[in-house]
Amino acid sequence: MTRVVLLGSSPGPNPPAHRPLLAALPGSPTVTGRLHGQLASLDPHPVTIVRADRARDHEGYPGTLVTTSDLAGDLRALADAVEDATESLLILPADSLIHDELIYQITKSKRGALALVAKEPRELREGLAGENGDADDNGEGDDDRVPIDEAEPEISDRLYEGLAVRARVGKSRVISVGSAFHAVTRPNAVLLGPLHLHHKHAATLAEAARELAGMAHLLGPEDDLAQLLVLCLVRRGVSVGVRGRRDLFFRRISGRQAADEAVAEMAGFDEDRARLNNAVKGADGFFTTYFVSTYSRFIARWAARRGLTPNQVTLISIFLGVAAAAGFATGTRAGSVAGAVLIYFAFVFDCVDGQVARYARKFGVLGAWLDATFDRFKEYVVFAGLAIGAAVAGQGDVWTLALVALAVQSVRHLLDFSYGAASRRKPPSLLPTLDLAVSADTALRQKLAERKLSRQTGVRGLLRMWSRAGRVRAVHWARKMIVFPIGERFAAIAITAAFFEPRITFLTLVIWGSIAAAYTLTGRLVRSLA
């Protein structure tokens, strides 16, 4: 479950006027009513924090209604609502018009904290050369006319989407957040409102929110409550990840006209296509990305719409894998070609089962176990089929090679699972902190610069260089392929078995698998020492 907190009294320049209706949507729901319906599966009893003079607009909805009188009260009420959380938190403005898929993607993030952001277009920023890229995770990289190291913190009065541009974001996280009191070095974004937070950070947020409540007299009417919460987290050293809306929709509604315009704009977005694209893993290997996922997602949607479950698709994949092994076991060229085709489609459906699960939101422990277990089963039964086929065709005894290939792959899986378990126990790297009573973020930026410098030497420096090399497309895909993921393994089996003898297939698996094991083990040893 997720604890949901709605901010019905978020200050800012455009507070919503009463209950804006979404007249163009079926049933003409209110913005708040639609949002409650969307969030019911996450938390049927959300907490709504609202000013007393706006409370009537939020009555009649499920959950707890907490009324306040000012910004300090908002912050204290938020602290009370989250401090004892034992589940993840989703905090967002009650005037949000948002796609269901965007809610899903935000709440399923693996980041400890994640905020939805919108970067201010470069042409709207003041004093930019307009020729260089985005900032890195230390807020550097926007090579403006004045180097960022020489720029002075500012309290920006620029607006973007009705919100004050008072946040500095890098490629993957929030660097600094400001307010009418807190100055930020070269702000470049707004925090739109939605914030997802792991419960381990709840107490930190509550404590910082109460401290900021005592400073509420220093804040301005344009300061947005959601942005202030991220300010609290960043100043406490919490790494707040960022994501944009991408191909999905989010707007905060300030009145009937804004509601009509937003609904018309939202109609131009294909939410189902975004959901389908999200069903495909973003970190797949080269073969999977270019030779499977280009069309497997459409098979997944077809299967989901006809009621097929992920487990049923897994069974199809298993059947095709066993049939491929039977084809290889015939020892004939025709059988080998048929086996190659069948093992390819066994892998396709192995991808489809996960895509069906993500598209249809059908997850289960049994399904995850079946998928992981029978991936290995299909691979090893194919090994047996190839070895039997070699014996039938009189091509010699390749069982020893088959056992070596199986052993290499088993050792690799053992290393993968053990390293994954060890990595989960590793404490996260701490970010620098800065007291909320300090206005300028200069000290925070200096600490971040020192942290960056310390990570550029020794083993960490080596890892950083290797990570940057991955930005080159050829290097990126070479690194993906060298680890010999399952897509590449099944492709290697299919191609070599169709054109050569099983001995060549096993030699390919052993050699490439050994190289992959050596590469992976070296990388993990280096990371363990960093």
Image (cartoon, helix red, strand yellow):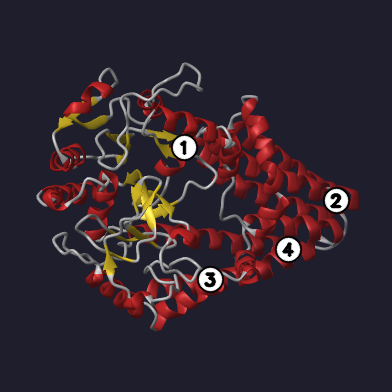
Residue at numbered disc 2 = 337
Q: In the image, what residue type sits under mark 2? A: Val
Precedes in sequence: disc 2 or disc 1: 2
Precedes in sequence: disc 3 or disc 2: 3
The disc at residue 365 is 1
Determine whether label 4 and label 2 are within 8 Å by CB.
no
Precedes in sequence: disc 1 or disc 3: 3
Whether residue 292 sits left or right of residue 79 in the image: it is right
**At x 21% / y 66%, what residue is drawn?**
440
Q: Secondary structure at mark 1?
A: helix
Q: Which image quadrant for residue 399? A: bottom right
Residue 467 appears at what percent x and percent y?
50, 71
Question: What quarter of the picture does the N terminus occupy?
Answer: top left
Residue at numbered disc 4 = 506
Viewer-nearest of labels 3 and 2?
A: 3
Q: In the image, what residue type sits under mark 3? A: Glu
Whether residue 51 sits left or right of residue 315 in the image: it is left
Determine whether label 3 and label 2 are within 8 Å by CB.
no
